[in-house]
Amino acid sequence: MKIDILTVVPDLLESPFSHSILKRAREKGLLQVNVHNLRKWAINKHMQVDDYQFGGGAGMVIMPEPLANAIDELQQDGKYDEIIFMTPDGKPFTQKTANNLSLKENILIICGHYKGIDERIRQRYVTMEISIGDYVLSGGELAAAVVVDAIGRLIPGVLNDETSALFDSFQDNLLAPPVYTRPADFRGDKVPEILTQGDPKKVEEWRHEQSLLRTRERRPDMLEE
């Protein structure tokens, strides 16, 4: 899978893709992440990519020309399966969306900044708009890193144990059950006995029951869905 990211602050994305699971995915050649500085396509020698918004109001808007030129140039190597714009008014990002995107081969993510991007780019190029929550960040870079991480770990071969992702929260519309590790007795708090008895079927039933209980307690809206 190849993911291109357009941003005016590329340095913000250096660390998230250089460690842990995503680093291994890139080293294995399973995931290619290219961060592009939008200022490469600036409209003048001052590296300008933004301007005041028509109608007045506080905040700058990323201009259409740099974005259009960048997208057109990047697509010369192949059309994107999805062009995603990270924005607070986008569709909420879910595990289902991550699952679907992990099946794509070529994705472009546009990171908003300032007051966002010119609406004409959204209408002309963007195929999907994503929000990671009902709050506003300084820009779309951190949100893009969240999306790439969620997608990347689902690519076959990225996780050492591929079945691990199948039991994550939200995969079956339930929260994950509680987990335990050694020691079996920690300051008087013991691991549930059923987990130490070696009966896989009973363990599976216990985990499912715990997932239901935890979801009902913390996210009852998921059960309604």
Image (spheres, rainbow, N blue to C red):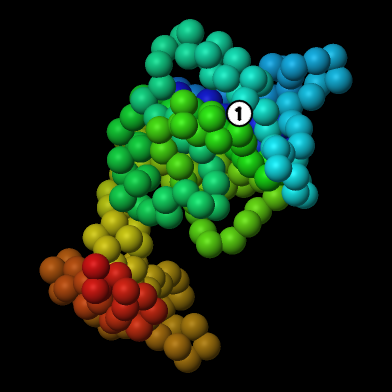
Which residue is at the front of the view, 56 or 152? 56
- Residue extending farthest to the front is 55
Residue 182 position, x and y percent, is 44, 71
**The residue tagged with tag 1: helix, strand or loop?**
strand
Residue 17 shows in this picture: no
Residue, x 46% and y 26% (percent of image)?
124
Residue, x 24% and y 68% (percent of image)?
225
Determine the image quadrant of residue 101: top left
Residue 209 position, x and y percent, is 22, 78
* Residue placed under numbered mark 1 in the picture: 6
Neighbours of disc 1 within 10 Å: few (<14), some (14-19), many (20+): many
Residue 189 shows in this picture: yes
Determine the image quadrant of residue 208: bottom left
Where 94 falls versus 220 (above or below)? above
Q: How many marks?
A: 1
Where 104 falls versus 187 (above or below)? above
Mark 1 residue type: Leu
Which residue is at the front of the view, 90 or 155? 90
- Residue extending farthest to the left is 201
Residue, x 27% and y 63% (percent of image)?
173
Where 113 falls versus 188 (above or below)? above
- Residue extending farthest to the right is 46
Instruction: Please state, as top left, top right, bottom left or bottom right, where the N terminus lies in the image.
Output: top left
Relative side of 148 to 217, left or right: right
Relative side of 25 to 223, left or right: right
Relative side of 143 to 39, left or right: left
- Residue extending farthest to the top is 76
Residue, x 41% and y 38% (percent of image)?
128
Residue 8 position, x and y percent, is 71, 32
